[in-house]
Each structure stands twice: as C-alpha cells, then as structure tokens.
Amino acid sequence: MSSEVSYSKEPHRNSRFTINSKEPFNAEPPVSELTKSFVTPNDLFFVRNHAPVPDVCLDTFRLTISGLVQQPLTFSLTQLQDGFRKVTVMATLMCAGNRRTELHNIQPVRGVGWGAAAISNAVWGGVSLRDVLLAAGVGPYARNMHVAFEGLDHANGAPYGGSIPIEKAMDVNGAVVLAYEMNGETLPRDHGYPLRVVIPGYIGARSVKWLSSVIVQKEESSNFFQRKDYKVFLPQVTWDTVKSLWDATPALLELNVQAAITYPEDGTVIENGLPCSIQGYAIAGGGRRISRVDVSIDGGKSWNVAPMVQEKGSTSTGNHHWSWTLWIYKVDQLPTPCEIVCRAWDTAFNGMQSEREWNLRGVMHNSWFKVKVLPAEHASKL
C-alpha cells in the first residue's frame, strides 16, 4: 500500500505540536505547556504512533480474549461497557524514548527524536483488565504467565503488540484498564479509539492502542516491539554487534525515575537578578512515588529541595502512585548566565544518572536535566 493511501485517513492534530515524524505521526506539545495543568488536555497529549491510524468501524469492532483461559470471550465495545463495572485511573504515560534527542546529540540514534515532552497525564475510563480475565476463567492468583496484546495498527508487516507479566495484569492494585474514555471523553483516534490498554507505571509502548486481542500465554509476546525493540544495551553495543543480544536482553517494562525542567527552557533570556519560578515534572515507575526533587542553579555544585505538587485522586490504588509529580522552585534573584539542573528520587531512593550515557535505541535516558539561561545583554547581541 502506498504512503498516500496508508496515511490518507489521519485525524486532525493540534497545530502547536512539534512534529518529530509525519508518517507515522509522532509529536509532542510545547514543553512549557506540560506543567500548566496536572491533567493534560486531550489535544495536547503527546502522540506516539508506529503506523497509520486505523479507521475503526465501531459496529464491527470486537475484542477477543483467548489463550490459556477457561472460557475464550468476544466482546463488542457495548458489551464491555454493559457487562463490567466502569473504573477510572489517573495515570501518566511516557514514551521510553523521551529525551532521546539529548543522546542523539552525542552519537546518532535510530528512532523518533523526542525532546522532553513525550509524556502526558490523563484520567482513563474503562473496564478493569483483571475483571475481564476473571470472567474468562483466569485464576485471581495466576502466576508465571504473560498477557499479550495486539492492536489493529500494522507495523513491520504484523499487528503492533506487546505483553506484560500476568502478575501485573491480575494485581488488584495494578490498575490496568481497557480504556474507552480519556479525560471524560470518547477515546480520540490518535490515542486508540475505540479501545486501548493502559498500563500504569510501565513504558508507554506496552499500552497498546486500537486493542483487538488479549492473549494469555506461557511466554512473553513474540512481537517485534517486545523482542527486537525497547531494550537498553551497553554504550559500546552497535547495530553491527546487537544481533546476538536481543533475545538475551530483557524487555523494558517499568519506567525509571525521570524529571525535566519545563520553564525556563534552554536558551531562555532572563535579566540578571530577577525572580524566577523554575517548574518541571518528575515521575517514577512501578507505582512508586516521587519522594524528592532537587534543583541547582549553579550547574550541580549545590542543591535545594523543590516543593512538589500532587493532585488529589492521582494516587489511585492502595499505595500505588500512577501520575507524575509537578514541582516548582522559586528563586528570588536568579543569577544569569547560569545552568539550572534538576534531579529526582523515588520512595525506593532510585535516582537519575549524573551524566548522559548513550545507548543504541536511545531509550530510558534519565540523566540530570539541564538548561542554560542567558543574560539580557545576550538578547541585544542576537
């Protein structure tokens, strides 16, 4: 199929996006917009697509539950909505390639060149994956299996897919949702209409969109994006040497600790000695909460703790924490020029790398985030 035909039915997108790839469409909002609201508006939620957006007919759409289940099931969207209790979870999704451009600047990296805005937060409404699997006869304490997902989008000649351990799927506090709503509205096409799986605490690649199949199986998904992508290798590994390492390297699941400055942006001009409200986000994986955000205005020589903002309702299940934390650090007199740096820690005291370390796929990059602020006299020289 030609590119013109494949991408002829793409949805309308916000003109404020920075487009990192047109076909397939991948785009992020202005980074300064991220911390203006705790919940990201649908039209500013970053878009990560691997293929053309499917044009799904709701009348013929079906979700199948199969594999190692006692009772294979098939549902229309209406049957899912009528047959199971509705649940909601506020959860942040982040592409594993967030901040990839920083690594590309060290050495070329194959993949979409993301800045720091391949992350967004939403309230997802749908049905619990656990409830659906229980209805199919999966035991509540099932272990040592995997739940695989397939979407209606096709990349590399096959449906996009991935999998998670069944322990995550069946965890009563795991909050895995088969979502048909996003921020109280019908799921937008770019985000998986009519149905997607949302897996809080995991990299965004596992939250398969346009969901059509759920398969319980002994092994993890054999899908390309589970087995041959989204993995972290040592810095010396290249495309010439990686072939033997794909199967031996575990697939990425939980997010690592991440933080970024959303204001001021790199290269912002601020008159020396003026007050400044430095803002940003932080997130941890696996339901762990961000416990501290540190900010430095002298390039990391000295640090102070930034006050954090957390919205009620974002801690959704038990002690699990699925949303980002926003933070703001106010400086009465910002000396410029200066380098502002931030880093974050979670409740297990996992932190961020002090230096950038390149990896083949440019994923899970979480070095200290740095921006340089320029003095006002710099603007007169431009």
Image (cartoon, rainbow, N blue to C red):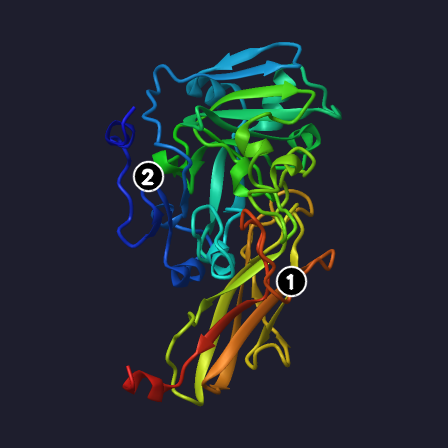
The local secondary structure at tag 2 comes to: loop
In this rendered view, identify the residue nearer to me: 174 or 215: 215
The local secondary structure at tag 1 comes to: loop
Q: Three-letter amino acid code at disc 1?
A: Gln
Q: Residue at x 68, y 44 (%)?
A: 318
Q: Residue at x 48, y 43 (%)?
A: 123
Image coordinates for residue 199, horizontal then vertical, percent: 57, 37
- Which image quarter is the N terminus in? top left
In this rendered view, identify the residue nearer to me: 202 or 52: 52
Image quarter of residue 193: top left
Image vertical order of residue 71 relative to residue 325, above or below: above
* Contact flag, marks 2 and 1 (Cβ < 8 Å): no
Return the residue at label 2: 23
Image coordinates for residue 185, horizontal then vertical, percent: 38, 38
Q: Three-letter amino acid code at disc 2?
A: Glu
Return the residue at label 1: 353
User: What's the distance in space between the residues labelled 2 and 1, CA to CA?
Assistant: 33 Å
State the residue lying farthest toward the top: 71
